[in-house]
Image (cartoon, rainbow, N blue to C red):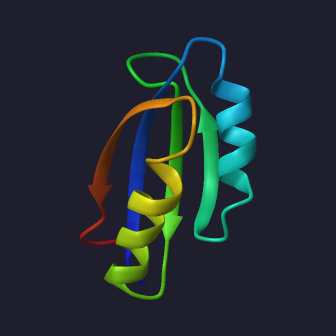
Amino acid sequence: MPKAIILINTDVGAEEEVAKALSSIPEVKEVHIVYGIYDVVAIVEASTFDSLRNAVIAKIRKFPHIKSTTTLIVVEK
């Protein structure tokens, strides 16, 4: 099953709102608010790479209050 780790920068103070919204997306399996360069980390899984791509591009990256994302595709467990 294709899997990705999404590193997310949010607008200042929007971390909890973004994390809560991401949790409602079916492909998002885990969400963590973190300290450091990034504000939120999400683990995303889908049945196909096309579904994974769609979840990242259409659902996550276009969400309000997300300034930028870095997507890491998992290549082995």
Quadrant housing residue 53: bottom left
What is the count of numbered marks?
0
Query: Which residue is at a point 40% across and 39% down the rendered structure image?
Result: 7
| Most foreground residue, 63 or 23 | 63
Pinpoint residue 17: horizontal percent, then vertical percent.
Answer: 73, 32
Query: Relative to 47, is 63 on the left or the right?
Result: right
- Identify whether 48 is placed above or below 55: below
- Percent of width and height locating residue 11: 54, 18
**In the rendered view, would you say 43 is above or below 21?**
below
- 74 sits to left or right of 32: left
Q: Residue 42 vs residue 71: left or right? A: right
Residue 52 is drawn in which quadrant? bottom left
Q: Picture quarter containing residue 32?
A: top right
The answer to whether residue 54 is above or below residue 23 is below
Residue 46: image x %, image y %? 48, 79
Work out whether 9 lies above or below 21. Answer: above
Which quarter of the rendering shows the N terminus?
A: bottom left
* Image coords of residue 34 (percent x, y): 56, 26
| Residue at (31% x, 50% y) in the render | 71
Q: Residue at x 47, y 47 (%)?
A: 62
Q: Residue lying farthest left?
A: 75
Quarter placement of the C terminus: bottom left
